[in-house]
Image: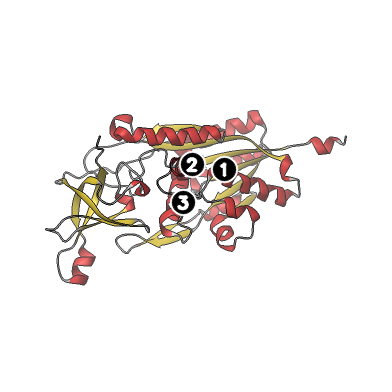
Amino acid sequence: MDKKLLDVLRIGIFYDGYYFYKISNYYKYEHEKKSRISISGLHEFIRSEIANHVDMDIRRCQIIDAHYFKGRSLAKDMGEKVQNERVFEDILMRENIVSHYLPLRFGGEGVVIQEKGIDVWLALEAYELAIYKHFDILVLIAGDGDYVPLVRKLHTLGTQVMLICWDFSYHNENGDIVETKTSRQLFSEVFFPVQMNLKIDQGSNEYIKDLFVPEKPHDFAFNFNHAAGTAAGGTAGVMAYEQKAEATEEYTSTIFSINPNGYGFIKDEEKNNIFFHYSRLANCDFSELRQGMKVKYTVEEDSERSKREEMPCFRATRVTLIEEF
C-alpha cells in the first residue's frame, strides 16, 4: 500500500471558552437561526474545511487533541446550577475535549467580574502541545489580538494555524449596538482564517446544516444537547455582561411572559411589569425559564424608554431563578 495513503493530518483545536460562549448566545437569541452551535458539528465542519483546503480525504484529517479554556464561578456562588456545568463537562469529555478552568475574580463592590489569565494559559498549553504532539494544523477558536504572539511562535515550529472567528453586531436591551470583531492583525497572521459568520449565512459548506443543535423543549435530550452547544460551562449570565456589583434592593416575583428572542417580563403591578434581557440572568440559561417561575431581581430605571414613553420605565439588572423543591 502506498505510504502516502496512510498519512494522517494531525489537528489540534483550542477554544477560548468565553469567546465561543458569546458566539453561541448570539446565534441562540439574536440571529435568525435561533439555535446554539453544536461542538460535534463544528468539529466536523473544521475537518471538512481543512480537507478541502489541502485537497485531502476528510478521513485523513483527524482531530487528535482538543482543549477548552474558560473562567468560571466558584461552586459556592453557583448553587444548584453546578449540575448544569457538570452536564456540559460531560459533553466536553464525550467530544474528547480537555477542559481548563480558572476561577473568576470578584474584586468586591463596584468592581467588574474579571476573567484573567485564560488567554496566557491557552497560549502556553497550545505552544507546548504543538511541540510534543506535532500538530500539522492548530485550530484557534478566538478573535483576540492577544493571540498573535502565539501564532508567530507556532509558525516557527512549522505548525500552521487555522482561525475560526466571527464578526457580528446586534442591538442590546439598551438599544446600543454591540459588536464582536476579530482582530485584523490576528486574522492576517494565520495560515487559514475562516470567517464563520459568512460561511453560515452563505451556507456554502455541506456541513453547515449540522452546525446547530436541533433543540426540543421539555426533553432530556434537549437539555443534554443544549449543554453541548452552549459552551457556557455553567452559570449562563455571570459574564454575559461584565456587571458591577451593586448594593441595591432585591425584589421577588414571578415570570410574567417569555419571548423566544431572548427577553421577557417579570410580574410587577406597581411598576407595570419589569423588562429583563437574557444577558441579565445570574444563575440559569434563558431557555430554562417558564412563565410563573419565581425569581429575585434588582431594578434600575430605563432612561431611554422613560423618555420615549414619558413615564417611569424599569428593567431588571440581575435576575436569579429561585430553586423550589
Q: Report the residue at 78% width, 36% height from top.
A: 7
Residue furthest out toward the right: 1
Q: Which residue is mark 1?
A: 40
Q: Earlier in the sequence, mark 2 or mark 3?
A: 3
Label 3 or label 1, whichever comes before in sequence order: 3
When the figure is inspected, residue 116 is found, relative to residue 208, above or below; the finding is above
| Amino acid found under the numbered disc labelled 1 | Ser
Q: Nearer the viewer, residue 87 or 63?
A: 87
Provide the secondary structure element on which disc 3 rests: helix
Q: Quadrant of the C terminus?
A: top left
Please name the residue that numbered disc 3 is placed on: 23
- Circle 2/circle 1 CB separation < 8 Å: yes
Residues at circles 2 and 3 in contact by the CB criterion of under 8 Å: no
Residue 242 locus on image (x, y percent)? 32, 47
Label drawn at residue 207: none
Residue at the image point whose x is 67% and y is 32% from the top: 134
Q: Residue furthest front?
A: 219
The residue tagged with tag 2: helix, strand or loop?
Answer: helix
The amino acid at mark 2 is: Ala
Using the image, tell me which numbered label, if any, was put on residue 228: 2
Residue density around tag 3, few if under 14, some if 14–19, many if 20 or more, within 10 Å: many
Q: Residue at x 52, y 44 (%)?
A: 147
